[in-house]
Image (cartoon, rainbow, N blue to C red):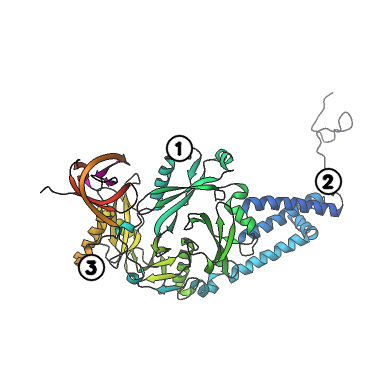
């Protein structure tokens, strides 16, 4: 029997065609789960579970002034509606069917979401810079300042010589010397610059090497933090009786971000800064943000939470009540953003686009300078149409936001860096971002010159207003001395101002009783002990080549930095001729 399986009239041996296409099959009915009250309970339980997990991981602030809150709420509404679709046995089809179902069965989350989105839209409009340019301009109050009068002149034994990259090298090297820590811990990347007991230093905590080392050591916490003197480049390890338990690199409940969120669920925070008080106790300074223009605009700091890094004790201070020892309340990026608003909208929004009369902006990059007991953020100010020269610069107190503008026309920072590199172009050194100093009432860029390995080899000073005046030196003392000579040569200072000696520089003359040497970072260092003395005077052959020619029995004159250590830094060592 020949069977044509493709014949649509063939019904098979049992009266059916096994290959015939079945049509008009009734759709399987989805039954709702339980009673309406039970379904609502299930929907809420799933939504709350999702909310708890999401909140723990993402840590959104419960605050209408942050976009994270709207994202969080919309996700909760979506989760609830999806659960409602599943538990109620939805029978509709297509997007239109789902929309009608949600509108009918999920009225509360639906209308709350629509209402919140409307609030966000209105809030964005009333925060728009087009309408509120004057308010953005007034976020930062800028006063005219007198640089020579307000910025104290410092001698070369007080000039901070370390940038963040160099500090990291020193910190990692110091940790490598500590056999009991190097296998378990690493140095964190914070390196906050502060004033500690009148000295410019960078401080940073340790962190766990990995998750296994965290499990092994978390009970005792992190055992120490590092303090790096930016002048002497000395690295000290401050060991703690009770370890640091709250850091940005911690996990779970002791993670600083999570710890802050659970204690202050409605607060908005800027990036925390690691600092130590005058007794050496470690803290996290956590600036509190507020949006002061409309709903989302005008970011500003209104206070700070100080978190004891050891105990976790939290204390909130209004911005005017922050303790004096705190150096970082207003972040550099926030100050720069506010000045850019100030300079851009000085004559309104339209002028910022057309005409641009008196419009100014900050230059790329910034640095810090210590004045009194505070740390100031420094950055150059340039015309919006200029890219190689400054019309001045600002100094802004990072604790109070007091900001002064100094009108000094001259080179912008990167032009000064190029000028310094040009002085030693045969060495192919790279300049660090400059530090602003007052040298004989002259605004001066100071920078280190590094080789390809990132090691500091020389120093340079460039006059801000006359950036063709460039001086270099193997030491800071030599660099400053050469710079003062050039200032006098250009009639910017008197001849008497070329000789300046720091207050803690001392001098001794004696006969060398012992010489020791060591190679550090490729440079040979000599340690001299004089007769009837028990201290050693350290001098680098890279700074003073004549040090390699000294011998036991030579009479030398040593200029050194006073201190109580057994090894003292020297400014100069010179051979005294025999009479």
Residue 329 screen position, x and y as percent: 50, 62
Query: Can residue 289 be found in the magenta stretch?
Result: no
Of labels 1 and 3, earlier in sequence is 1
Q: Where residue 520 sits in the image (x, y, percent)?
A: 32, 41
Among the two numbered marks 2 and 1 on one chain, the one whose residue lies closer to the N terminus: 2
Q: Nearer the viewer, residue 274 or 107?
A: 274
Describe residue 86's horizontal placement relative to residue 474 as left or right. right
Task: Tell which of 133 and 201 is nearer to you.
Answer: 201
- How far apart marks 1 and 3 lie (CA) works out to 52 Å
Residue 322 in the image, given as x and y percentages of width and height: 52, 65
Give the distance between the C-alpha atoms of the residues marked 2 and 1, in whole angstroms. 72 Å
Kindly state the secondary structure of the residue where label 3 is placed.
loop
- Which contiguous range is marked in magenta? 521-545
At 39% from the left edge and 58% from the top edge, which residue is drawn? 199
Observer-nearest of 483 and 115: 483
The CA distance from mark 2 to mark 3 is 95 Å
- Quarter in which the N terminus is drawn: top right
Going from N to C along the chain, the mark reached first, 2 or 3, is 2
Residue farthest left in this picture: 579
- Helix, strand or loop under label 2: loop
Q: Which mark is residue 493?
A: 3
Task: Give the vertical position of 259 relative to 183 (above or below).
Answer: below
- Viewer can see residue 235: yes
Q: What element does badge 1 sit on?
A: loop
**Can you identify the residue that label 1 sits on?**
179
Residue situated furthest top in the rendering? 1
**Residue 353 visible to an observer of this rendering:** no
Left/right of residue 522 with respect to residue 240 in the rendered view: left
């Amino acid at each position: 029997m020949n069977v044509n399986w493709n014949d649509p009239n063939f019904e098979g041996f049992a009266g059916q065609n096994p290959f015939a296409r079945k049509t008009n099959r009734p759709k399987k009915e989805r039954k709702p789960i339980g009673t309406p009250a039970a379904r609502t309970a299930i929907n809420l339980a799933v939504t709350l579970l999702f909310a708890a997990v999401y909140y723990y991981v993402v840590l959104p602030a419960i605050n209408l002034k942050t976009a994270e809150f709207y994202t969080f709420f919309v996700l909760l509404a979506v989760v609830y509606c999806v659960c409602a679709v599943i538990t109620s046995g939805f029978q509709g089809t297509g997007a239109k069917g789902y929309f009608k179902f949600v509108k009918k069965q999920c009225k509360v989350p639906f209308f709350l979401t629509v209402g919140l989105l409307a609030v966000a839209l209105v809030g964005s409009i009333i925060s728009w810079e087009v309408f509120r340019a004057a308010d953005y301009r007034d976020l930062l109050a800028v006063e005219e300042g007198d640089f020579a009068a307000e910025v104290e002149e410092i001698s070369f034994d007080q000039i901070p010589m370390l940038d963040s990259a160099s500090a990291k090298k020193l910190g990692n090297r110091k940790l490598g010397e500590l056999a009991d820590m190097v296998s378990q811990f690493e140095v964190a990347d914070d390196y906050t610059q502060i004033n500690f007991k009148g000295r410019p230093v960078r401080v940073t905590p340790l962190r766990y090497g990995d998750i296994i080392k965290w499990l092994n050591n978390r009970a005792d916490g992190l055992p120490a933090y590092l303090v790096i003197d930016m002048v002497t480049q000395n690295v000290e390890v401050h060991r703690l009786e009770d370890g640091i338990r709250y850091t940005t690199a911690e996990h779970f409940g002791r993670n600083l971000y999570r710890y802050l969120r659970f204690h202050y669920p409605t607060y908005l925070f800027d990036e925390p800064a690691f600092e130590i008080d005058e007794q050496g106790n470690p803290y996290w300074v956590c600036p509190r943000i507020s949006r002061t223009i409309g709903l989302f605009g005008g970011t500003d700091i209104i206070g700070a939470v100080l978190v004891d890094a050891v105990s976790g004790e939290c204390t909130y201070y209004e911005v005017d009540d922050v303790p004096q020892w705190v150096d970082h309340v207003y972040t550099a990026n926030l100050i720069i953003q506010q000045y850019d608003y100030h300079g851009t909208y000085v004559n309104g929004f339209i002028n910022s686009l057309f005409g641009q009369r008196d419009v100014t902006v900050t230059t790329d990059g910034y640095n810090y300078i210590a004045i009194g007991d505070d740390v100031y953020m420094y950055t150059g100010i340039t015309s919006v149409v200029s890219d190689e020269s400054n019309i001045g610069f600002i100094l802004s107190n990072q604790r109070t936001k007091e900001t002064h503008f100094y009108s000094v026309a001259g080179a912008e920072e990167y032009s000064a860096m190029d000028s310094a590199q040009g002085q030693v172009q045969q060495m192919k050194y790279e300049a660090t971002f400059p530090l602003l100093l007052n040298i004989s009432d002259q605004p001066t860029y100071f920078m280190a010159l590094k080789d390809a390995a990132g090691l500091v080899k020389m120093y340079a000073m460039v006059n801000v207003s006359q950036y063709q005046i460039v001086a270099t030196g193997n030491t800071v003392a030599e660099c400053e001395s050469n710079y003062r000579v050039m200032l006098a040569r250009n009639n910017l200072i008197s001849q008497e101002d070329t000789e300046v000696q720091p207050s803690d520089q001392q001098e001794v003359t004696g006969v060398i009783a012992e010489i020791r040497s060591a190679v550090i970072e490729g440079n040979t260092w000599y340690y001299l002990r004089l007769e009837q003395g028990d201290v050693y005077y350290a001098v680098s052959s890279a700074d003073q080549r004549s040090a390699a020619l000294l011998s036991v029995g030579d009479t030398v004159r040593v200029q050194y930095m006073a201190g109580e250590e057994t090894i003292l830094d020297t400014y100069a060592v010179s051979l005294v001729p025999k009479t």
